[in-house]
């Protein structure tokens, strides 16, 4: 089973509050060049992770905010995150660039 990579509630809260770099689709911290997605020209994306964005396009372009929320919950549970940290990550999704103009999770 995968383990928590060291992102506690407090660390995730700090990343969000201090506007540190994180994926603008899923919220994953972009603290390692290996997790950055790529642009069409092959350069590193500074906004999206490799799981959400490759070659200048989203890996799942039709994904909804609700589906992303379910995916985040599933992945974070597999990595043994506590529920408080998962709730923080999910609650931040509507603030991310990809989801700002979508229907909020509360109304779905």
Image (tube, grey):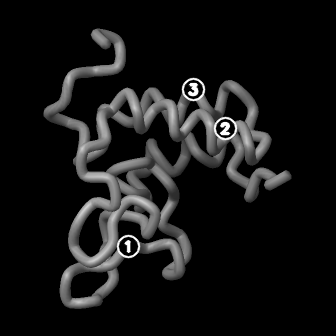
Q: Is residue 99 above or below residue 102?
A: below
Residue found farthest to the top: 107
Disc 1 element: strand
Q: Is residue 29 above or below residue 18?
A: below
Residue under label 3 = 87
Q: Earlier in the sequence, mark 3 or mark 2?
A: 2
Instruction: Tell whether label 2 touches label 3 (CB within 8 Å).
Output: no
The span from disc 2 to disc 1 (Cα, nearest Å) is 25 Å
| Gap between marks 3 and 1 measured at Cα | 25 Å
Q: Position of residue 92 (x, y in %)?
A: 41, 34
**Could you tell me residue 4's position as x and y percent?**
77, 51
Mark 3, secondary structure of its residue: helix
Indicate which label's residue lies in the foreground, 2 or 1. 1
Q: Label 1: how many residues lie within 10 Å, few (<14), some (14-19) or many (20+)? A: many
Cα–Cα gap, marks 3 and 2: 9 Å
Nearer the viewer's eye, disc 3 or disc 1? Answer: 1
Residue 68 in the image: x percent, y percent? Answer: 42, 38
Residue bearing the label numbered 1: 37
What is the quadrant of the C terminus in the image?
top left
Q: Earlier in the sequence, mark 3 or mark 1?
A: 1
For residue 18, side relative to residue 38 (left or right): right
Q: In the image, which is nearer the foreground, mark 3 or mark 2?
A: 3
The residue drawn where x is 43% and y is 58% is: 22
Whichever of labels 2 and 1 marks the residue nearer the N terminus, that label is 2
Residue shown at the point (62%, 37%) measured from the top left: 74
Q: Which residue is mark 2?
A: 9
Q: State which quadrant residue 93 falls in.
A: top left
Identify which residue is drawn at 67% across, 38% down. 9
């Amino acid at each position: 089973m995968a383990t928590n990579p060291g992102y506690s509630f407090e660390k995730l809260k700090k990343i969000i509050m201090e506007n540190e770099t994180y994926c603008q689709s899923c919220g994953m911290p972009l603290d390692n060049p290996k997790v950055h997605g790529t642009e069409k020209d092959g350069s590193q994306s500074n906004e999206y992770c490799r799981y959400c964005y490759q070659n200048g396009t989203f890996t799942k372009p039709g994904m909804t905010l609700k589906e992303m929320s379910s995916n985040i919950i599933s992945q974070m549970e597999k990595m043994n995150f506590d529920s408080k940290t998962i709730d923080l990550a999910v609650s931040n999704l509507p603030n991310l660039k990809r989801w700002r103009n979508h229907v909020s999770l509360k109304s779905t």
